[in-house]
Amino acid sequence: MTFFFNLAFVERPIGIFDSGIGGLTVAKAISKHLPNERFIYFGDTAHLPYGDKSKDAILRYAKSISNFLMANNCKSIVIACNTASAISYEFLRDKYKGVIPVINVIDPIIEAVVADGSHQKIGLIATKTTVNSGVYHEKMARRNPTIKMEVLATPLLAPMIEEGFSKDKISHTVIENYLSNPIFEGIDALILGCTHYVLIRDEINEFFKGKVKLYDSTDIVALKMKEIFKNEDLLSSKKEGDNHFYVSDITASFQESTSRFYGGNIKLELLKL
Ligand code: DGL
């Protein structure tokens, strides 16, 4: 009996959520590293950007999205957004303790930076809310207080990327303006602390002439999930059914942008929570 229950449980979908479509970069990495899993993605496009929302508002959104994912029998929840991870992870982790694993995009990056062992001074770029939460500093100080971390809020980047500006004059100017900030002088690594920034990773790499190691929340997070699923016997052996991509508000521009964030054609479905 237990066996059948377990079998059904591992075949349940993974719930993934973000403020919008940026988290699709994480979903894409999950589908690459965990091809037998199916997922339910929820992009809270009606409330984006989370990056300049209050803690209260983000927590409220995260609660209602996780209720929706749980009502759809998800076997795990991935907070595919740095801002929502910074604000809502502890709450969701405690709420679902012993029920399902909740995964955020910050801890796996901190773990990877510390495991590298070579970093002395690192930079972080993220939304205002993520930076102001102080969560990256806190987590890094707990794991390795000798690594110096310089943080900068880069609020123009997410909307710039969403509007399709990359590898052009505008993106070049904005990136250069932010990254030439003197606080980043001498960094040996940079954390791309927003799921959107993956799309300008190459440009950031060019800015630093390949001399600064970049960390983002795609492969690192997906591989961490694989490890957690393995340890907790949650890996599915066969993908049962299709992925679903829900958004709380739909526009032609969101639909168009999905191919840049996810690669390939996906259909957004409207779902107002
Ligand atoms: N995707 C969000 C993050 O990773 C940023 C976008 C937003 O501000 O909503 O922080």
Image (tube, rainbow, N blue to C red):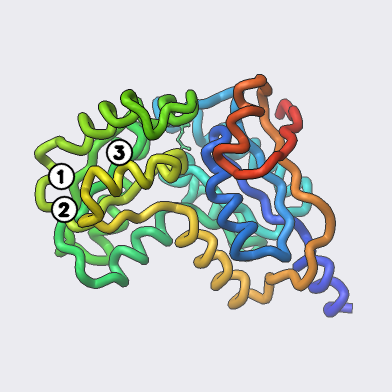
Q: Which mark is residue 131?
A: 3
Amino acid carrying label 3: it is Val
Q: Can the viewer see residue 54?
A: no
Q: Is residue 231 left or right of residue 88?
A: right
In the rendering, at what x and y percent does residue 101 appear? 60, 61
Mark 3 and mark 2: span between their CA atoms?
18 Å
Q: Disc 3 vs disc 2: Cβ atoms closer than 8 Å?
A: no
What residue do we see at 45% from left, 53% from top? Answer: 217
Which residue is pictured at 18% across the width and 61% down the height?
147
- Judging by the rendered image, the residue that carries numbered circle 1 is 184
Residue 28 at x, y percent in the picture? 59, 51
Q: Earlier in the sequence, mark 3 or mark 2?
A: 3
Under mark 1, the amino acid is Phe
Mark 2 and mark 1 in contact (Cβ < 8 Å)?
Answer: yes
| Residue 63 point in image, percent of width and height | 60, 39
Quadrant the C terminus occupies: top right
The x, y position of residue 120, in whole percent, is 15, 62
> Mark 3: few, some, or many residues within 10 Å (few <14, many ≥20)?
many
- Looking at the picture, tell me which residue is in the foreground, 169 or 194: 169
Residue 1 shows in the view: yes
- Which residue is depicted at the point 29% across and 36% down? 132
Number of the label disc, if any, that sits on residue 214:
none
Checking the image for residue 187, the label placed there is 2
Quarter residue 198 falls in: top left
> Which residue is drawn at the image coordinates 21% and 48% (left, top)?
208
